[in-house]
């Protein structure tokens, strides 16, 4: 799409940008919950709502941005909401220890949701992550009390953020609508995008210093989705010493949650590649995973480690 082919030069510096809403207030969280409840969750109208929403957008839109959850694809659970409300969530890039124990993610495909080809495509994402980092995935063993339940609900692509140590027994959700491999939720970058949520990562634009890199154009955002553009504070997230990356596979597209087809995100500096691409994982995406999991060699200067929990 032409609109995606942007290498923006900074034409104007925005003065007096409104300071972004902070996520960690009860009001913000209850607004999010109310919105999700009224718009998407659990109702028969879900599909209709999502479809009309998608209908207004380009056909190659990132489906996970429109899957009906917080920020599009993040499944809220009580722990996460508590974190939002109490500002105890040291998440995004370092969570309530959001790292899977032993750098190992046990998973199970929900029975019969995917055919062999689809399972292979999802496993290929895991293999890629394992090739690039010290994180491993393996089928769940009976001894694993906490594991990822890979489901194929047709309503979209979404996931819980990270492991949650308070969960002694149970599953974390990782959902892909069972599209043909290469399309929709099973586009290879989208497969990895959701898996990076599973590993404990938030969306790139949620981090506290994003306003140095992008301008969020609030007037073009659907009012109900404004809170999806709120930021986490530096007490809540760590960038792990890796600079903001507009090409990140975790970055929203420039039309995310647009009310009318006008851009909702604009780059403030020139950059290469495409904002919101889901074709590849960038080197800085990999570095962040390696640092979050304290993989060998990830910190070239160990005394500069920015790893709150390790
Ligand atoms: C799929 O998602 C919809 C909407 O969130 C929900 O109503 C339905 O129960 C889900 N189905 C499964 C099997 O999780
Ligand atoms: C992590 O590894 C240790 C040592 O091998 C083992 O005792 C422990 O059960 C493992 N934890 C998990 C959750 O797999
Ligand atoms: C991971 O590396 C192995 C061994 O080098 C290779 O066979 C496999 O194709 C790689 N997988 C991916 C998804 O890159
Ligand atoms: C996995 O999720 C699906 C869909 O929500 C659910 O039906 C199934 O019971 C879950 N499996 C486990 C083991 O929790
Ligand atoms: C979208 O809405 C905003 C706010 O009303 C407006 O400024 C912008 O021009 C609109 N864009 C289009 C393409 O209509
Ligand atoms: C996705 O597929 C394309 C084309 O085969 C390939 O160039 C790219 O590296 C793949 N990306 C991921 C994240 O697997």
Image: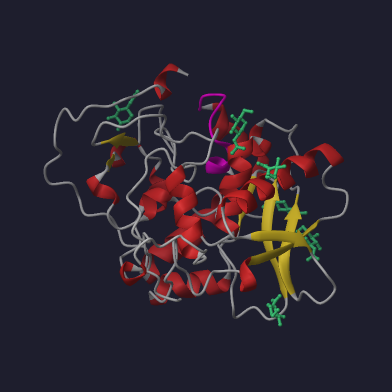
Q: Residue at x 27, y 54 (%)?
A: 209
| Quadrant of the rendered image containing residue 217 | top left
For this view, does 10 lie left or right of residue 196?
Answer: left
Q: Position of residue 302 (x, y in %)?
A: 37, 69
Q: Where is residue 69 in the image (x, y as percent from the top left)?
A: 56, 52
Q: Which residue is drawn at 52% across and 65% down?
A: 293
Which colouring convention does the figure follow?
Answer: secondary structure
| Quadrant of the rendered image containing residue 183 | top right
Q: Which residue is drawn at 57% across and 24% down?
A: 59
Q: How many labels does the image show?
A: 0
Q: Ligand 5 appears in which quadrant? A: top left
| Residue 177 in view, yes or no | no
Nearer to me, 253 or 224: 253
For this view, does 7 lie left or right of residue 282?
Answer: left
For this view, does 8 lie left or right of residue 256?
Answer: left
Q: Dominant secondary structure of the magenta stretch? A: loop
Magenta region: 57-66
Magenta span contains residue 106: no
Position above or below: 16 against 308: above
């Amino acid at each position: 799409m032409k609109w995606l082919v942007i290498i923006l030069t900074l034409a104007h510096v925005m003065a007096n940008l409104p300071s972004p809403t902070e996520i960690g207030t009860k009001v913000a969280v209850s607004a999010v919950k109310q919105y999700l409840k009224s718009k998407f969750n659990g109702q028969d109208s879900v599909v209709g709502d999502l479809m009309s929403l998608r209908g207004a957008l380009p056909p190659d839109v990132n489906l996970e941005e429109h899957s009906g959850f917080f920020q599009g694809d993040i499944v809220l659970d009580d722990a996460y909401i508590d974190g939002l409300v109490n500002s105890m969530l040291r998440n995004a890039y370092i969570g309530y220890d959001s790292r899977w124990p032993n750098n190992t993610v046990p998973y199970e495909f929900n029975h019969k949701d995917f055919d062999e080809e689809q399972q292979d495509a999802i496993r290929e994402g895991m293999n890629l992550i394992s090739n690039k980092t010290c994180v491993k995935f393996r089928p769940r063993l009976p001894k694993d009390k906490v594991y990822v339940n890979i489901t194929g609900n047709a309503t979209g692509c979404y996931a819980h953020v990270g492991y949650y140590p308070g969960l002694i027994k149970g599953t974390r959700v990782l959902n892909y609508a069972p599209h043909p491999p290469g399309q929709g939720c099973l586009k290879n970058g989208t497969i990895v995008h959701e898996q990076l949520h599973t590993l404990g990562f938030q969306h790139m634009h949620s981090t506290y210093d994003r306003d140095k890199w992008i301008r969020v154009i609030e007037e073009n955002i659907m009012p109900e989705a404004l809170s999806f553009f709120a930021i986490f504070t530096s007490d809540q997230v760590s960038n792990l010493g890796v600079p903001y990356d507009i090409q990140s596979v975790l970055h929203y597209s420039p039309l995310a949650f647009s009310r009318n087809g006008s851009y909702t995100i604009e780059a403030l500096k020139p950059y290469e590649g495409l904002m919101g691409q889901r074709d590849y994982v960038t080197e800085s995406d990999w570095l962040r995973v390696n640092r979050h999991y304290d993989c060998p060699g990830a910190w070239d200067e160990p005394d500069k480690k920015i790893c709150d929990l390790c």
